Amino acid sequence: MDLNFPVLSCLLAIPFLAALGIALIPVKNKSDKEIAELCRRMALFASAIILGVSASIFFLGFNPDQKGLQFVEAYQWLGNLSSFKLGIDALSLSMVVLTALLLPFVILASDSIAQKTKPKLYYSLLFLLCAAVLGVFMAQDLIFFFIFWELELFPMYLLIAIWGGDNRLKAANKFLLYTFLGGGFLLVGIISLFWLSGGSTFSLIEAAYQFRALQENGSLADYPALINGLFALFLIGFCIKLPSIPVHTWLPEAHVEAPTPISMLLAGILLKMGGYGLIRFGTEFFPNSLVALAPVLALLGAINILGAAIFSLVQDDMKRVIAYSSISHMGFVLLGLATLNSAGLNGAIFQMFSHGLISAGLFMVIGIIYERAHTRQISAFGGLANNMPILFFLFLGLAMANLGLPALSGFVGESLVFYGAFTSLGELSIVQLSAAISTLGVIITAAYMLWLGKRIFFGNLPEKWASLKDVRFSEALVLSVLLAGSLILGIYPRFLSDKIEPFANRTVRVFQVENLESKNVL
């Protein structure tokens, strides 16, 4: 691959152009069905190009052993202060590939949604959302990072508010309120970073270098409380998106009201923006604060893992079960970052990628059942395996991946996080204690996933569900590929970890490990 070719700009431009092209499709003398089919074909074509470009970067162009950013592009915007700068490392690459991989599956799952109303608007918003998320993962300028971060709110709000369920406006408004508030914390934090780092540049890498230098032997060396307080602003903003308890309440409602493809995007990609931001800003700007506040992150992670698992156990709405399950699994990102070592960080990134595949598949299973039965109440079902054996088989595989069965990807990410936690410094640290508590969450995850499957697919089939049909070919294809992805990563995790591990090894060197025992011991 030609490293001088502006591949990241092209990758970012494709979804914008696709959104514009779909919006401009002529509708004269065409039926609604013909318009929906034309939009679908164009969307699948554009998503295939995005996936192809991303796969080319992953397999052919990216060198995991190279230090720093790759495929860097920079175009002047505000003189020396700010530029439209793009670049990727292993963290960015994993999230870009995840986005590109899920997008065509989301489009395939959108047939029944887009055909009902406004297909042009639906697919255009879908690609605008994709462009914003890709921009977050590739932007290397603080201003453009924030622009892309906020741009994501607009299409996601409309996708829930227009195509959602009966309480869609309430859920969309709650999503907007929480995430806009999180963006406010990020804006204050970014402005403060710019000012405290000398006010000379918004470049993420350069500002981070200046900011760390001032912390180590400059004007900020005597103000650790100020630095920790600034890190707390970013922590709150990113935890809202992750989301983390107690700022998580927007997510279950958004999932319940969002149409199935949007729930797939929300759980599969958008939540990862919070984890990405925590890792990116925490390690680049606040390594000392991460050391000091690692116990807080570990406790938050344990609360997420255990608390959300308990919430999942008592739900009667299938979507709420998987929504709280997502919150629980994102707790491993917090716990992995808190370990401050390569294994934990590697596990956190691996967990984000793995959860993206698994959660998207589980939400699609629920969407398939809802499309046929028009209810998500678990108590209304039983015995569906009789009529839907293929769906049962695919659900069972995804459920096993979600509960962390060995040889599936969920096991790899969680195992790396636990290994990193239990090998962290200190004879008895809060990180290790939090990891021990989190093992209860893993047990409860197995309980609610198996119980969910038992109540839906086993037992006597109610007479009113006797006519339910099994999955269509397109649905089976999507679920099979997502399950296969989890299986491949579970059997051969080096497929992804070989890209991540060198990045994790280099990243953890910024931590002041000699201070861990004094700051992280219970």
Image (cartoon, rainbow, N blue to C red):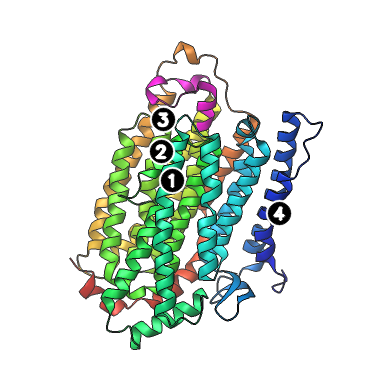
Q: Do callouts 1 and 2 mark residues in contact (Cβ within 8 Å)?
A: yes
Q: Do callouts 3 and 1 mark residues in contact (Cβ within 8 Å)?
A: no
Determine the secondary structure under disc 2: helix
Mark 4 Cα shell of 10 Å, populated few (<14), some (14-19), many (≥20) = some
Q: Residue at x 29, y 75 (%)?
A: 226
Q: Is residue 256 left or right of residue 249?
A: right
The question of residue 246 being in magenta is answered with no
Q: Which amino acid, mark 2?
A: Glu
- Give the CA separation, mark 1 to mark 2: 8 Å
Between residue 281 and residue 387, name the one nearer to us: 281
Determine the secondary structure under disc 3: helix
Q: Residue at x 47, y 35 (%)?
A: 168
Q: Residue at x 56, y 70 (%)?
A: 64
- Give the CA separation, mark 3 to mark 1: 29 Å
- Give the CA separation, mark 2 to mark 3: 22 Å
Q: Is residue 217 left or right of residue 90?
A: left
Give the label on residue 453, or none. Answer: 3
Between residue 24 and residue 235, name the one nearer to us: 24
Q: Is residue 307 left or right of residue 155?
A: left
Report x, y in % for residue 38: 75, 38
Q: Earlier in the sequence, mark 1 or mark 2?
A: 1
Residue tagged 2: 253
Mark 2 Cα shell of 10 Å, populated few (<14), some (14-19), many (≥20) = many
Segment tinted magenta in the rendering: 367-387
Q: Which image quadrant: the N terminus?
A: bottom right
